[in-house]
């Protein structure tokens, strides 16, 4: 039975490593927590059959075609940047400097030699549903620090994005505002709940600790899935939003299943470290949500912050308990060893 337990542990570790290694990488600046909100002020011509909105507060400008018309979004030098065909296909001009500048929120990408506003467009299909979202540096504040002397509620920019609709020139006017810092109450509540849960479970058994880990990982997985699905796929949200809690859930579940089927605590403590480590990693990837005003998710922001804090507390406790056990392994006298 001991060999079977070892195989289970190794399989779990290999699966976790493989999933993390093969998970599609999120773009370096996928929509994340932010202290800014950009509003669509106006669209010209009035009544144009398009839907324009901001994704992630101020991260991505999204345009959707509502009727079979041609729409061309112009780049920073007036060159054709995006083209929406009447059939719903969306194309990107790979020779437009905007394509490369928009790879990162702050436009730090180096332009390739073939990128030029005067070059003949080279169109590449990027969507087929008549909708696309992209970083547009005209729609957000282009600095990691807010403008000097600004306060919460102040407007930090107003700009226009030029478009052509069936050959007629138009504009999308946007304005961005600095938001107030979020309340720390949800974070404190989540941390307090986590400390109480840890204090109760850690006076009991590994099973109680694993059950707490299961519940917390399940909550993180649910909120992570909501955040992952709250933004369009072209903004490339991180798969880790849901993957890390799933791995934590699997580790905690296997711990429960093996509690009476192994002769030593080594495997159980290894699973606790795995579950706790995944929870910590999830909490760290979402840490900015605790102190930034706007979170790109459809879940209530206060709930999200509470769960992030709760996950970090329980993750640290599980990891610490597991590491402590690995340093002092014990034999389990009453383990049910299968024949």
Image (cartoon, helix red, strand yellow):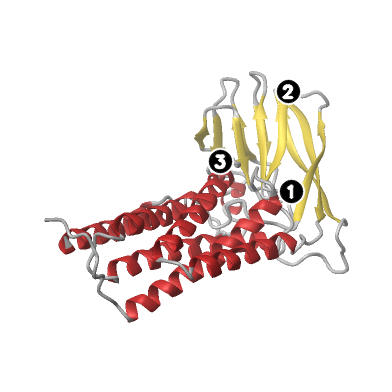
Q: Secondary structure at mark 1?
A: loop
In the image, which disc is placed on residue 122? none
Residue drawn where x is 18% and y is 60% of the image: 337
Q: Which residue is mark 1?
A: 139
Q: Nearer the viewer, residue 87 or 230?
A: 230
Local packing at callout 2 (Cα closer than 10 Å; few below 14, some 14-19, many 20+) is some
Question: Residue 109 occupies which quadrant of the picture?
Answer: bottom right
Local packing at callout 1 (Cα closer than 10 Å; few below 14, some 14-19, many 20+) is many
In-image side of 71 versus 7 (left or right): right
Q: Nearer the viewer, residue 196 or 182?
A: 196
Q: Secondary structure at mark 2?
A: loop
Residue placed furthest toward the left: 339
In-image side of 205 versus 75 (left or right): left
Q: CA distance from mark 2 to mark 3?
A: 26 Å
At which x and y percent is residue 278?
Answer: 44, 61
Label 3 or label 1, whichever lies nearer to me, is 3
At which x and y percent is residue 39?
Answer: 79, 43
Q: CA distance from mark 1 to mark 2?
A: 21 Å
Q: CA distance from mark 3 to mark 1?
A: 23 Å
Label 2 or label 3, whichever lies nearer to me, is 3
In the image, which disc is placed on residue 229? 3
Q: Which residue is mark 2?
A: 49
Q: Let me know if residue 172 appears in the view.
A: yes
At which x and y percent is residue 300?
Answer: 69, 47
Q: Let me know if residue 106 appears in the view.
A: no
Q: Quadrant of the C terminus?
A: bottom left
């Amino acid at each position: 039975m001991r060999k079977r337990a070892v195989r289970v542990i190794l399989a779990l570790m290999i699966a976790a490593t493989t999933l993390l290694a093969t998970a599609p990488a999120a773009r370096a600046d996928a929509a994340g927590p932010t202290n800014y909100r950009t509003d669509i002020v106006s669209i010209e011509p009035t009544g144009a059959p398009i839907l324009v909105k901001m994704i992630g507060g101020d991260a991505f400008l999204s345009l959707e075609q509502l009727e079979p018309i041609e729409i061309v979004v112009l780049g920073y030098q007036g060159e054709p940047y995006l083209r929406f065909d009447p059939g719903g296909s969306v194309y990107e001009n790979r020779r437009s400097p905007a394509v490369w500048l928009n790879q990162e929120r702050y436009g730090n990408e180096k332009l390739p030699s073939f990128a030029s506003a005067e070059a003949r467009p080279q169109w590449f299909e990027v969507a087929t549903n008549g909708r696309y979202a992209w970083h547009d540096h005209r729609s957000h504040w282009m600095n990691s620090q807010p403008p000097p002397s600004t306060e919460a509620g102040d407007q930090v920019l107003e700009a226009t994005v030029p478009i052509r609709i069936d050959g007629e020139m138009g504009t999308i006017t946007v304005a961005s505002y600095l938001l107030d810092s979020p309340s720390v109450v949800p974070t404190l509540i989540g941390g307090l709940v986590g400390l109480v849960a840890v204090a109760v479970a850690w006076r009991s058994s590994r099973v109680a600790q694993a059950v707490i880990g299961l519940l917390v990982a399940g909550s993180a997985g649910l909120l992570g899935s909501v955040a992952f699905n709250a933004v369009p796929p072209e903004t490339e949200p991180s798969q880790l939003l849901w993957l890390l809690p799933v791995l934590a859930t699997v580790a905690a579940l296997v711990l429960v299943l093996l509690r009476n089927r192994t002769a030593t605590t080594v495997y159980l403590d290894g699973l606790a470290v795995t579950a706790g480590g995944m929870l910590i990693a999830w909490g760290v990837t979402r840490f900015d949500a605790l102190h930034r005003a706007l979170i790109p998710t459809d879940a209530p922001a206060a709930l999200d912050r509470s769960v992030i804090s709760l996950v970090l507390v329980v993750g640290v406790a599980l990891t610490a308990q597991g590491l402590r056990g690995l340093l002092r392994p014990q034999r389990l006298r009453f383990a049910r060893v299968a024949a």
